[in-house]
Amino acid sequence: MAASAPVRDDGVVRRLLMLLCAAAVCVVMSVGTAAPSLAEFTPWFARSVGSATQVLSVTGTGGSDAKLDVWERTGTGWQPVAGGVGIPAKIGAKGMSPDHFDGSMMTPKGVYTLDFAFGTEANPGGGLSYVQVGPDHWWDGDMTSPTYNLMQVCKKDQCPFNTSLSSGTENLEIPQYAHAVVMGVNKERIPGKGGAFFVHSTDGGATAGCVAIDDATLVKIMRWLRPGAMIAITE
């Protein structure tokens, strides 16, 4: 005697299909709306810094105010360095400029190397070379000088360039240079295209074109910096 065919419960089948469809929709929605991980975020300067793995990003916030963020490239992409986000900074008294020149009182926009560090205080440590400066250390701002836009060491009355403030030359033994990092602006040393651009200790006021932050924070950053680091400046 042949066995009778099982009776199909269409209501049960429909409910199972509805549950399976609902589960599939939930999976699709969860994948489509998942928040991107931090590793997927690409900062604005990423395509402009070559193989650099350390970047100080400076963004103007209005007038002579800006914020500085510290970034590091890791195996999972660019990541903000702990404690290095939204650092208050001061920039040029007249803001930023895409075409820097001597006496503009503006901070140059763009991406630049961070070449070496100096300061009136002792070397705090770090990967960049450091020069402790005194009364005989100058940044040559004399546009007629063959050492324009370079650090020089000489007695004031023996320097082969104009040491007057009106020439743009700076004596480096000042409180704002307790610590400083040299920005590689106008490395071609084209007369009139600006010089003496640093990340340095702040006195709370606008700068003549540099980037200034709290000295204690700057020291922490200097200890972290290594050769090849860069600074990226934008509005």
Image (spheres, rainbow, N blue to C red):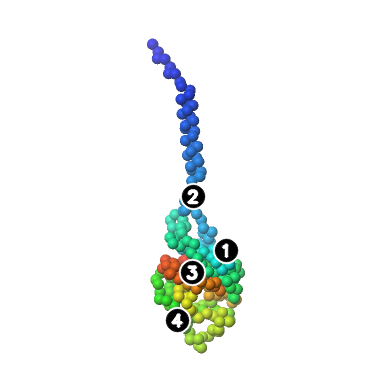
Q: What residue is shown at x 45% (from left), y 81% (from top)?
A: 134
Q: Which amino acid does label 4 sit on?
A: Gly
> Marks 2/4: CA distance?
50 Å
In this figure, which residue is indicated by the disc labeled 4?
134
Secondary element under disc 2, as helix, strand or loop, is loop
Disc 1 or 3, which lies upstream in sequence? 3
Q: What residue type is labelled 3?
A: Ile
**Residue farthest to the bottom?**
157
Q: Which amino acid does label 1 sit on?
A: Glu
Q: Quadrant of the C terminus?
A: bottom right
Q: What residue is shown at x 50% (from left), y 37% (from top)?
A: 25
Q: Quadrant of the N terminus?
A: top left
Secondary element under disc 3, as helix, strand or loop, is strand
Q: Which amino acid does label 2 sit on?
A: Pro
In this figure, which residue is indicated by the disc labeled 2?
36
Q: What residue is shown at x 47% (from left), y 51% (from top)?
A: 37
In this figure, which residue is indicated by the disc labeled 1?
235
